[in-house]
Structures are given as structure tokens and as C-alpha cells.
Amino acid sequence: MNTAQDILHSVFGYATFRPPQDRIIETVIEGGDALVLMPTGGGKSLCYQIPALARTGCGVVISPLIALMQDQVSALRLLGVKANFLNSTLDPATARQIEQDLLEGDLDLLYIAPERLTQERTLQLLGRAPISLFAIDEAHCVSQWGHDFRADYLQLSLLHERFPHIPRIALTATADARTRTEIISRLDLGEAAQFIAGFDRPNIRYRITLKHNAKQQLLRFLKEEHPRDAGIVYCLSRKKTEDVASWLQEQGYNALPYHAGLPASVRADHQSRFLRQESVIIVATIAFGMGIDKPDVRFVAHLDMPKTIEAYYQETGRAGRDGEAANAWMIYGLQDVIKLRQMMESSEGSLEHKRAEQQRLNAMLGLCEITSCRRQALLNYFDDELTENCGNCDTCLEPVDTWDGTEAARMALSAVYRTGQRFGVAHLVDVLRGAENDKIFQSDHHQLPTYGVGKALDNNQWRSVFRQLVARAYLSVDMERFGALRLEEKCRGLLRGEENIQLRRDVKTKTGSKRQTKSNLPTDIDIALWEALRDCRRELAEEQGVPPYVIFHDRTLQEMCTELPQSLSQFGRITGVGERKLDKYGSSFLQVIEQHLSAA
């Protein structure tokens, strides 16, 4: 195992690198620092695992989530890699033994939480041990502008100060230009080589639609497209996660809640069941997901709008890590925007931070309302470019119907102005439609020129107009006035008749209409053999207490179905089968294939 290529093939069972993995690995092996931005499922972990195996000493991986270390270490051990972790779950005797293994050079990789790493005792231990590299995973946690900020990460610049000659590699899947700049500054990576891989995940289908009956919309989506699949459903509040999980259980789904308010033991159990069992749905807040390494998540659904595009990209990126077709499905409404802005206003951040968060929320809302290719807009946010429409998002597959909303927009803006910019959408719609209620008469708004001028549109159509004007920054939401709408500078041209505006026509459609017909398998695969191989994998996984995908990914099982290996040498040529897995599992899977062929 002298070269990275040898390690890639013999340990991990892959024939070739995915660019720019090879250049990143070469940089770190040669002792250089690296900042790596690579999409979820793009193979970031190999970028530090292979250098750790190629260089002398142990690779130290700083990972933010204790719950995931066990699965990462278990997967590496199955490959024959000497891996372990140090965290608060260990008893003192076990921790001392791991520390001794580190000092004696008996570890290839050591996973450690940032809180533990920054303790002086740990730093002294690392100073006496042979260390090959430091890998800072989920590096966006260092950024106070990011969506997963962790204060413990702010101290990690000490690695460069205490260990100036040991290479460092910082990795993340989501970071805009501002976050990248802060990562470089906070981690003292000014001299590091930067590798920014394309952010595109073409296997994920992005779909965003209006919220009108969230539970029924979700149920229809699951029944028509993912009746037996593993997936994640994101909600804004803890209460909602528990409510939706309980309701899905009543509908016959294996659904589990996950949020920071649950006892640690319950969270760990639910996460473990999601990783190790099949067809489990996790209903969660943003507390769940960072670092999740489950390849066969077939869908990520959002019942509320995330507050930033970074959060949306990272959360949807947990679907389809195996490269197979997956869905990113979201429903949203103006109420989501109001709720998120209330959360921002009540936060303790500085005025500058709140302003930046507001800009990011506006960008997220803009992605929801866009009438052109969603993937182009998503990639453009990260300074990535897609020259043609993707053909795999809702606006590409079902082009949005638009209408000339110029006159309606002017009426809406006029209503905001004439009512003093002190009222929310519901009252403004009442004014435009000429409602006769106490609030209208008490405020004398029945005497305004705009009173009753908008009867041609119904309540939902007017809500759509206001929502889109907010999304395009003609209006903003004043949270100090409980959601009142106010005019922005941008609206002047529209009010003066100097510009026109096309609005999207909201149409309530069945969630599953004209959607892809989901097929788990290529048409040339024998279903009986596929299920037999999955049963074999499941039994081996249960015996060893690991998730099924740690044994083999679905793609490896599919290749077994098409190649039908008859010997260990043939089995060893299957993608994802390294030397250790060939010795450990080859005969079991060959026996399944042999039994299938003899029965055929």
C-alpha cells in the first residue's frame, strides 16, 4: 500500500478517483494544507482517510457529532483500518487504552470531538504521539455566518500554532464566499490549497410547492413515490416534529421524531435505528443530519422553509448519496417567512448578523418563487454555473405558468402605502376586496381609494401577489409591527409605471401528478436475486451491529446482480469490494448467487 491508488483499490474497493479527489489526496500526502468544498456524497472522507493511511502516524479527525463517530469507526474497521474514537461515552479504562494505542502507533485514524481536542491534556497527548494529519470535518461550523455554527470550532486555529508541521485538511459541503473566507481566517488556512468541486447533485430532483394542507400533501407524496423508502422530514419546531412523527405512525409508517429537546439516549436510539434499519423515516428539526452517512436516503421533505440556501442545500444533500434517483420535496408559505423573521428578530445576534441573515432568508424565498430552473439558481448561489436547464427540477419538468401582475402589484403596493405600512397581509386583502368588518370600519380604511378595487382576485390570489412581492424585495416584513408589510426602495419603478412584473400563477396540483415513476432498480435486474442479496446483507449487518450499507452499498449489490460472479476472483472485481471485504463476505454472497442460479 505504497500509493494512494493502491489504498483506494485494496482497502476501499474502488478502481478510480473522482476528480479532484486525487489532487487533494496528493496535496495532503505531500504535507500541504487543503480546504475542500465538495457536495454531500462526493467522497470527502476519502480525501483524509487515504492520506492518513499513506502517511506515517495517525490521522486525527475532528468531528462535531459524537453519535456518528461509532458508525464511522465501525465502517473503517470492517475495511481493516485501525480506527477508534475518543469522546465522553467511553469509560476511563477504555479511553486510556485508546490513548496508549495512539502513543504506540497502533492507530490509523482517531475521531475526536472539538471540545475534547482543545483540552490541554489532549493537546499534550497529541504532542507525544505520531500524527499524520488533522482533518477538520464539517468546517463550516467555524463560521458565525454559517447555519451550523459551533463555538468549539473557533479554537481550532491552535492546531496550526501547536503543530505547525502537520498538514491540515478542512472539509465542508456548504459554504458561500463569505463563509469560505471566514473558514480560512478562523483556521489559519491562508496558505492552504483550495479545492472547490462542483456543487451539482444531478440525481436529486428539486421540487418546491405551496403549502395548503401539509400533512395530506406529505402523505400523498409518500404514498405515490416513497411508500417503503427511508427518508427525512424536516420541520421548524420540536412540537411539530413529534406531532408529524406520531401522525405518520398512525398512517402505517415507521416514523421517529428527532430534536434537541429529546433525551440523549432517545436521540441516539432513533438515529441508530434510522442508520441500521431500512424504511425508517426520521421527522426532525435541523438538530438532525450533519455528517449522516446513510447512502440510500431516497427523499428529504421540508414541511417548513429553511432559513438559508446553505441549510436547504445541506439538508437536501442527505438524499441520494449513493448516486441513485432521489427527491428533495418542499412545501412553503408566507407564514414560514414571518415565523423565520420572528426567530431572527428575537435572536441575540448583532445588527450586522441579523442583516446578513435577512439577506440569506430573502435568497431562500427567492429560490422558492423562481420561475426558471431551480438547480441553476441553487448552483449560482455557490458561484457554480450550469449553462443549460437541468431537466430534473419542477420548473424544468412543468414550466411555471405566469401572468401579467403589474396592475395587481400596484394595487397591493398602494394598499400598503395608504394604510400606513402598519398592517399584515390579511387586513390588506380585506381592504382590496372591500370586506365589511369591524377592523376595516374602525380604521376608516373603507374610505381609502384602494378599498374594494381588487374584487376580481380572490383571497388566495391576493396572498400570492403579496408573497411574491415580498420574495422579490418590493415589500418587506416589519417584525416589530407583528408582520406588517412595508415598502422597499425597489418598488418605486413599479408604482410609477416605469416597469412591469410577471407573477407565477399558483395552481393546486396533486403532489404526484406528472412526476417521475420511481423505480428502485434498473429493469435488467432480477428482483428475486436482489432481495436475496439484501437479506444476506441485513443478516451480516445485524450480526456485526452495523448499518447494512457498511457491508455493501446498494450499487455494489446491483453490480452483483448484473455481473453474477462465480468465484472469489470475479467477486473481487465488483466495485466496492476491497481485499478485506472480499475475505470477510465473499463466500456468503457467492453462495446466495449460486443458490439463485441453480434454482433458476
Image (spheres, grey):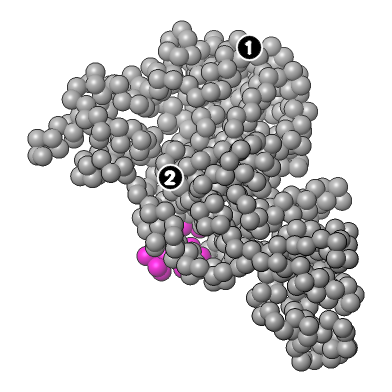
Figure check: 473 above or below 170: below
| Image x and y of residue 129, in percent | 60, 14
Q: Say which mark, if any, is on residue 393.
A: none
Q: In this orientation, which residue lies closer to the viewer: 316 or 473? A: 473
Q: In this orientation, which residue lies closer to the viewer: 438 or 513? A: 513
Q: Which residue occupies 78% across, 83% down?
A: 453
Q: In this orientation, which residue lies closer to the viewer: 406 or 44? A: 406
Tell me the quadrant of the picture where the N terminus can be found. Answer: top left
Range shown magenta: 244-257
Q: Say which mark, if any, is on residue 325.
A: 2
| Image x and y of residue 530, in percent | 25, 41
Give the total of numbered labels: 2
C-alpha distance separating marks 2 and 1: 38 Å
Figure check: 319 above or below 418: above
Is disc 2 placed on a helix, strand or loop?
Answer: loop
Is 25 placed left or right of 152 in the picture? left
* 245 inside magenta stretch: yes
Q: Which residue occupies 56% across, 38% down?
A: 200
Check disc 2 and give the amino acid type.
Ala
